[in-house]
């Protein structure tokens, strides 16, 4: 580990801990999800160790429906952690400072949505962020900063990169485990084949992953919108807009690159041999890709043949990384591809990591056991960046702080 962790944190500290509780919000209600459960571990550990703990987190982005305060988050986190979590609707004003100063050993306080502070969001250097009144004012109240928000660590926001310049900085447990699992594809040696399941809706993500990992991955198994775009590159009349406008624009922007990647890594790429669609009666039906003369309907999943094709590859792998769903799994009729492949991964003993936000949601939606995977990431954008070897600025700041201490 290249940064200090909670194992290095001195006793009885006033701790400012950044977590990532950014969640879906439906009709104003924050949806419970595994981010609460994961961060609960760090929060419980800090509280039980007797630290005085204030938590910083963000929710949504200004202007969006998901941009709400964190009152509900405090209750959800308390439920998961089994410790009281109080909430103050202020981040670093007088009300927040009073609540922070009133903390006693083992207390946990959640401050207001960090993105409600003007200084938080603009992507600026850690030096600039460290000089903001937000960071300076809060840092004066604490002995230590813990960053547990791996899934937000690609953002150069004040709460993520400013504080390691102002306080001794440590990684929380989520930061530690996410870092280790998500960098494994680049850093670990595996004895046998490495397989990557790539799907989802964004061609650019898939291209990036393939280009960055072409040398490390033996087989890429494709599905989803991205998979259809690769089928188009292979000469099939799919990967085009019918009802859903998901393909033509992406093809215009990335078609050449998809063709080049297919050409370059062709031997390592497996494409769907059949696809599933909705019949006029609302049922699921499947068609072999070879039998499609013209695309007249949207394809919503890969078919059973494809799953049967992918299963032995997964079984023979020493490591499997999953990024992106193979179909519209939120609709039970079109979950077979994503769930079938995830079940195949769960059944092997290989090292396995599932990430990319949505994909990991299929695991809980369809009652799979997280323990059957080596790691289920709670990161979205940060997961892609980690897989493609890009630096996460929040992690880099923890590493810098470990080497040199607060600036
Ligand atoms: C996430 O949910 O992936 C992180 O919290 C980052 O959120 P953002 O994409 O709004 O910066």
Image: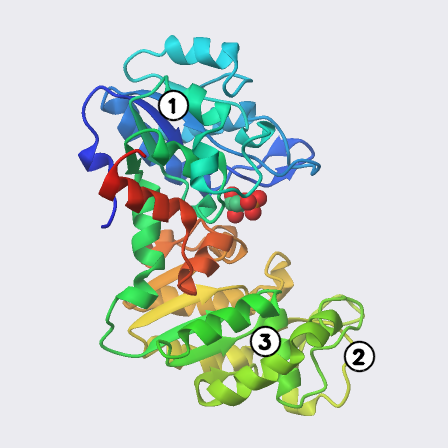
- Which of 177 and 78 lies nearest the eye of the viewer? 177
In the rendered image, residue 5, in percent from the top left (x then y), is placed at 24, 39
In the rendered image, residue 208, in percent from the top left (x then y), is placed at 51, 70
In the rendered image, residue 64, in percent from the top left (x then y), is placed at 69, 38
Q: Secondary structure at mark 3?
A: helix
**Are there few (<14), some (14-19), or many (20+) residues within 10 Å of tag 1?**
many
- Numbered disc in front, either 1 or 2: 1
Location of mark 2 (residue)? 296
Q: Is residue 145 left or right of residue 2?
A: right
- Which of 81 and 151 lies nearest the eye of the viewer? 151
- Numbered disc in front, either 1 or 3: 1
**Residue 38, relative to residue 317: is it above or below?**
above
Tell me, for residue 139, which label it has, or none.
1
Q: Is residue 245 visible?
A: yes
Marks 1 and 2, how far apart at CA:
59 Å
Marks 1 and 3, how far apart at CA:
47 Å
Location of mark 3 (residue)? 227
Q: For ligand 1, give the image quadrant.
A: top right
**Residue 328, relative to residue 12: is it above or below?**
below
Q: Secondary structure at mark 2?
A: loop
- Which of 328 and 281 lies nearest the eye of the viewer? 328
Marks 3 and 2, how far apart at CA:
18 Å
Q: Is residue 58 left or right of residue 163?
A: right
Which of disc 2 and disc 1 is earlier in sequence? 1
Q: Secondary structure at mark 1?
A: helix
């Amino acid at each position: 580990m290249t940064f200090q962790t909670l194992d290095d944190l001195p006793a009885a500290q006033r701790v400012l801990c950044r977590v990532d509780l950014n969640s879906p919000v439906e009709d104003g209600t924050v949806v419970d999800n595994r981010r609460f459960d994961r961060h609960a571990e760090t929060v419980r550990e800090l509280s039980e160790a007797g630290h005085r703990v204030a938590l910083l987190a963000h929710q949504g982005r200004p202007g969006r429906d998901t941009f709400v305060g964190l009152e509900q988050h405090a209750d959800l986190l308390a439920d998961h952690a089994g410790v009281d979590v109080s909430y103050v609707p202020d981040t670093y004003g007088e009300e927040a400072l009073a609540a922070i100063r009133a903390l006693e050993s083992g207390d946990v306080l959640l401050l207001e949505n960090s993105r409600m502070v003007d200084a938080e969001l603009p992507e600026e250097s850690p030096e600039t962020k460290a000089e903001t009144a937000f960071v300076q004012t809060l840092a004066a109240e604490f002995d230590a900063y813990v960053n547990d928000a791996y899934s937000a660590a690609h953002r150069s926001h004040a709460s993520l990169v400013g504080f390691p310049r102002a306080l001794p900085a440590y990684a929380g447990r989520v930061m530690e485990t996410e870092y280790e699992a998500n960098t494994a594809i680049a850093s670990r040696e595996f004895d046998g084949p490495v397989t990557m399941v790539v799907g989802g809706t964004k061609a650019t993500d898939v291209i990036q992953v393939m280009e960055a990992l072409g040398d490390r991955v033996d087989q890429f198994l494709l599905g989803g919108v991205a998979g259809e775009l690769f089928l188009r590159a292979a000469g099939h009349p799919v990967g085009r807009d019918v009802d859903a406008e998901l393909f033509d624009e992406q093809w215009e922007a990335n078609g050449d690159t998809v063709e080049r990647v297919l050409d370059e890594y062709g031997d390592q790429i497996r494409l769907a041999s059949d696809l599933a669609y909705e019949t006029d009666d609302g049922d699921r039906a499947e068609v072999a890709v070879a039998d499609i003369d013209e695309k007249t309907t949207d394809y919503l999943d890969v078919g059973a043949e494809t799953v049967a094709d992918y299963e032995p590859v997964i079984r023979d792998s020493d490591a499997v990384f999953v990024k992106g769903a193979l179909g519209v799994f939120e609709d039970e009729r079109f979950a077979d591809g994503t769930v079938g492949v995830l079940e195949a991964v769960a059944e092997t003993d290989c090292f396995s990591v599932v990430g990319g936000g949505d994909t990991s949601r299929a695991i809980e939606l369809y009652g799979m056991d997280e323990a059957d995977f080596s790691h289920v990431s709670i990161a979205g954008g940060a997961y892609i960046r980690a897989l493609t070897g890009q630096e996460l600025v929040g992690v880099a700041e923890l590493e810098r702080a470990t080497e040199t201490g607060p600036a």
